[in-house]
Amino acid sequence: MKSAELGIGIEKPMSPVPVRPLAGRSRITLKEIANIARVNISTVSRAINDSPLIPRETKEMILAIADRMNYFPNSLARGLVSQKSETLGIILPKIFFLQGPFFSQVLSGIEHESVKNGYNILIASATSKVKDRMFPFNLTRARRIDGMLIINENRKIQNLSALKKEGVPFVLVNRYIEDAKVPCVAPDDVLGGRLATEHLLRAGHRRIGVITGSTRVSATLGRLDGYKEALAHAGLVFDPQLVEAGLFQQGIETGSRCAEKLLSLPDRPTAIFAFSDELAMGVMQVARNRGLRIPEDLAVIGYDNVAYSAHLNPPLTTVAQNPYAIGTIACQMLVDLLSGKKLDKTNVLVPVRLVVRDSCGHRHRNA
Amino acid sequence: MKSAELGIGIEKPMSPVPVRPLAGRSRITLKEIANIARVNISTVSRAINDSPLIPRETKEMILAIADRMNYFPNSLARGLVSQKSETLGIILPKIFFLQGPFFSQVLSGIEHESVKNGYNILIASATSKVKDRMFPFNLTRARRIDGMLIINENRKIQNLSALKKEGVPFVLVNRYIEDAKVPCVAPDDVLGGRLATEHLLRAGHRRIGVITGSTRVSATLGRLDGYKEALAHAGLVFDPQLVEAGLFQQGIETGSRCAEKLLSLPDRPTAIFAFSDELAMGVMQVARNRGLRIPEDLAVIGYDNVAYSAHLNPPLTTVAQNPYAIGTIACQMLVDLLSGKKLDKTNVLVPVRLVVRDSCGHRHRNA
DNA sequence: TTGTACGCGTTATCAT
DNA sequence: ATGATAACGCGTACAA
């Protein structure tokens, strides 16, 4: 196969380098550049990698040629040597997570931060296929990714121990775990639950209904904890009758259904804390149907601060999260991990904030 | 080749073979397996790749060891030889595209289809960095991706010729181009514009206002064409005064603003066709403020059929697109392209459908 | 300062 | 049926 080498080379010697039209996918390699520049391949490599072991002029000469030939380093070859792929994996339990504005924003943040750090992003979601039982280790084992951002909304991470054992750098996104050994970044759901509940409490409500998302996800559990905390702090006892479980994915429908139940209670709540703006929309719908005025007859508070929440009737008081920040922070953490840095903070809780509008009555000063 | 990967990967390290603790990232290679199995490395390779040149028992023996050792082929090394990376690039002009439900769904479709075909997905967006002037060719030149799905909503593709010259398989997503040489898949915006307008026409409206998105994006242009077509077909003349340009990104705000203008016209429109449901929400808000009843005093039709559109007051008549299908189709096309297949259809327009609800008056039979 | 040579993990082409 | 070995494109000690 030496003939192949010969065939590849460009014979024309240097200076005004005759650049051919680059037919199809060009396959310029270090070797070709070396041939043209009449230097050794390793010299070219040094020039490309901006090594200090090489004089400026030589470097510039080589770089000029490389430029003209439209050279690009083969990242596969590089990765084979460096044992790195310069790409981050975003691991999704199901493809479903891709939907919804929250995740979109998280992804957006990750993307932004990763290009800033010179990393590519590989999206991978678990499928139901049997051969994917190695997921997501197949990706790191195959050296496709250097580390992973694991998006997981379930309360229990199934493979956490396997994950740690694997020794691959990873950051849990959207899941908070106490264990300092597990880097994670998540929204402060407890805070959110507390903020919303306290707001209602301040408005004088004592029976506050809650419409949660799926009871398995941490968003539900965390916010519920915050709700209970606030109640306890106000000296109120938690009434299980006041909490109904909806579904984030079918916010409006399940929100309506839950609101019906809540409002049919003998001692009905005077306020409802919905764990998403969509759920809140369902509540508002039911209220409208029942002739209940918001906020006079029923206070409603949502969660997420989606674009249209300010434009509902009445404008919805809600809790704003910061999914974009979650993405950037998580990505930054992973990048640090990969570069061997010690994380100054391994478990971060991204704060949320209350957005007071009209659906809970008159505005309060300290909101 | 891939079939071999099927059997590989078992969690429990087992007895016979002396398996070391797999400290950190395991680096099991063909060579190590060969050592243990006491065969040549190429024999192992054959076993892994399910070659017919090797007896069943040898193959099984080797596969068993590989399994036990948790072997996974290094895709970098493989790619170096095969000149393929088995990954598809999703090329975004700006990170901004990641947001919004439409793109999420497209991505979701792409993801689903790609894993089905054994491809990984690399997300890459153009940044403003100077050195990114080679984007997205840096990715293919570096052999990071085998082909690309280019998401572009602008009417004019800037680098189309460069793209074709590069010789990299690609599919334009969300952009329709007549040229049969350019594979693309996009929503049928013209149809959508026509459907919506005809619906309004059938309800008796003659002055139909339009609120578009940015005038540069094909979604706007296409739907506007459809609007004009329908008008012309009905013998109506197009009145430029009736079209206002909003922004998809700030749907509600700009929708309101445009609606104000439209409704302040001396001969105000009796119906408004908004190019997104969010824009339509803005319209509804203005209508409410002005004491205009919908649909009695003003008919409103939206676009996108977002989750909450059915729950607005009144439920919004709209045009449903199929972004998920756009994703799967585009991905399938690219996969075919990569496998050398001839595409039976290079330029596909994904149909949309009218979703009739209450915001345009009584329902029509042939909608 | 620059060249030589080896290794990264695989596949493929020879032999044997 | 299996082994030896040359690519693939690059980085890098080690020489020169």
Image (cartoon, coloured by chain):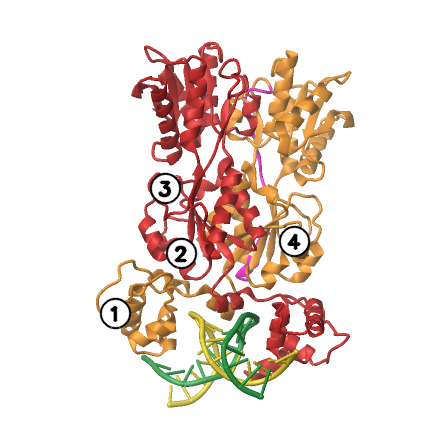
Chain colours: A red, B orange, C yellow, D green
What amino acid type is highlighted by mark number 1?
Pro
| Dot label at residue B182 | 4
Task: Name the image quarter holding the N terminus of chain A.
Answer: bottom right
Q: Are marks 1 and 2 on the same chain?
A: no
Q: In the orientation shown, which residue stands out farthest toward the left?
A: B15
Q: Residue at x 36, y 39 (%)?
A: A154
B52 and A59: which one is in front?
A: A59
What amino acid type is highlighted by mark number 2?
Val
B224 and A187: which one is in front?
A: A187
Q: What separation in Å lies between label 1 and label 2 (alpha carbons)?
A: 23 Å
Residue B145 on image: x %, y %: 55, 59
Which mark is in front, 3 or 4?
3
Is disc 3 placed on a helix, strand or loop? loop
B128 and B338: which one is in front?
A: B128
Which mark is in front, 2 or 4?
2
Q: Chain of mark 4?
A: B
Q: Residue at x 54, y 54 (%)?
A: A120
What amino acid type is highlighted by mark number 4?
Val
Task: Label the magenta part by its dominant secondary structure.
Answer: loop
Which mark is in front, 3 or 2?
3
Between discs 3 and 2, the one toward the N terminus: 2
Picture layout, residue B161 above or below residue A330: below
Q: Chain of mark 3?
A: A
Q: Residue at x 57, y 46 (%)?
A: A112
| Pointer 3 residue | A177
Q: What separation in Å lies between label 4 and label 1 (alpha carbons)?
A: 55 Å
| Pointer 1 residue | B18
Picture layout, residue D11 above or below residue B131: below
Q: What separation in Å lies between label 3 and label 4 (alpha carbons)?
A: 49 Å
Q: Which residues are magenta?
A: B337-360
How crowded is the residue under tag 2: few (<14 C-alpha within 10 Å), some, or many (20+)? many
